[in-house]
Image: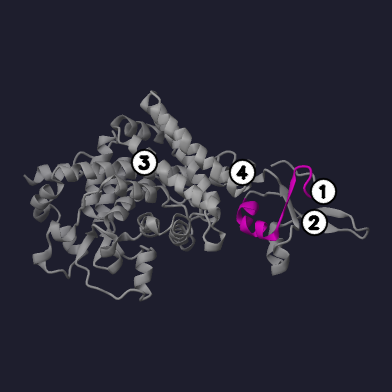
Amino acid sequence: MPAIQPASPGHGNLLPVTGDYVLEYLDALKARSVSVFRVSKNAQGNLRADPVDPAASQALTVAERSQKLFLVEKDWMAKAFSESDSFDAQLEPLLRESPEERASAVTTLRTTLSELRKKEVPAETKAKAIMDTLSQVFLLNKASLKVKAHEVTVHEKSVARESDSIIGSALEMAEEPALMAGFFSCFKGLSNGQTINHVMRVFVSFTGFLQRFETLHQNRLSTTLRRVFPSVYLSLYRKILPSVDLRLMTSDQLLQLPDLDFLDRKEFSLGAFLHDIGKMGNIDYFESDLGFDAEQIQQHVYLGAGLILMNYGNSHDGARMMAGDHHNALGRPGGYGITRLERERGVRAPVETIRVLSSDPKGFVSGEALGWLPVEMLAVADVYDAMTDNSRTYKKAMTPAQAVVFLEDTMAAAGKLDPVLVDLYVDFLRTQNVVVPEDRGFEFKVKQAR
């Protein structure tokens, strides 16, 4: 990065910032050797700016932290992340806008998407336009949503309301098979490890998986599962719930598979869209070169659930739970989430667990079930994307074929993902021309059981 020439606060190429600002971005400033200047007055009372170590902000008093005592280059973030076009770099300009401007921008995007629905354009072109629109909507949500009730105004509520409408429109368009194929073709340009791209991939993948599930459910999925369950899946579920009476170890008892109407799918798609809204720049392990911090990462589910509750309201409790519980791991060690935290803290009276998947959130919240269907569907899509993302610095990416084997032989076998949902997801990937092993998936196992 070129040397910065100090200028008067608010002028030239420097931006006055508070001590809190420097503390918030301390790791990034240090890791990328960004020049930081401390503002002070000389004996004549003139302002001067001297280069300092950004760690000097840690010595400030509480009162000093809120004062604009430092200078940094105005576009340091955009320059520092220019090679990867990072989440932070995209978010920074939106944070400088007013709440009213951000709300207006989301409304404009809703209008744009509505007009796009009427246009006759190639599916891949339309898919790319939808993905770009949704990316901007997500960023505007991230820049706008507040976690404290008294900070939420009509503008944040407007962002939430318009975003919900946009998800509904996108879901309706995505029901066209050609458009879903177009979404998957866009993934080639969305594999650079950024949070926003992970969110888009998971949203599309989950939405398609949800639609396929409902189609299969309407075509006697439960009947087929009932027939093959004893020979194909019983042993796996026996390991997940070893204390349940063997007479209750049936697919009908263990797996509640509900009918999902459009409003259900819309709510769950909103949850997938917002599932990582709680991720902050300093814990964004998709693009960070500072390493993976498990304790910090876990905070994103609690913050995400809080943001949805405060801004989207109680009418979107389904989306809130999806953000808060998608790392539930069916209650296994290593998993975490708002619902299991409440159980661990004794907020809810313990009840006997008698099934793996509940058709409604009440069964999951009470502890009667280890998971809730849409949450666990999202978990499968989320883990698959994490395994195949080739830009995460803390691990080497798997091929789709390797990831499918991992989902079945490691995650499902350990009871951290539901075995049936994993197999159904593998079949869905196959419908989108993703190369997966021929001897994997629900359809293959059904054929083998005949």
Dot 2 corresponds to which residue?
39
The amino acid sitting under disc 4 is Pro
Callout in the foreground (2, 3)? 3
Q: What residue sits right under mark 4 in the picture?
A: 93
Q: Which amino acid type is marked by label 2?
A: Val
Q: Quadrant of residue 57?
A: bottom right
Mark earlier in primary sequence (3, 4) = 4
Disc number for residue 29 = none
Question: Which element is circle 4 on?
Answer: helix
- Give the mark nearest the N terminus, 2 or 1: 1
Q: Quadrant of residue 75?
A: top right
Q: Which residue is mark 1?
A: 8
Q: Amino acid at mark 3?
A: Val
Report the magenta residues as a range.
7-31
Residue at numbered disc 3 = 204
| Residue 36 seen in the current view | no
> Tag count in the figure?
4
**Helix, strand or loop under label 2:** strand
Foreground: 449 or 255? 255
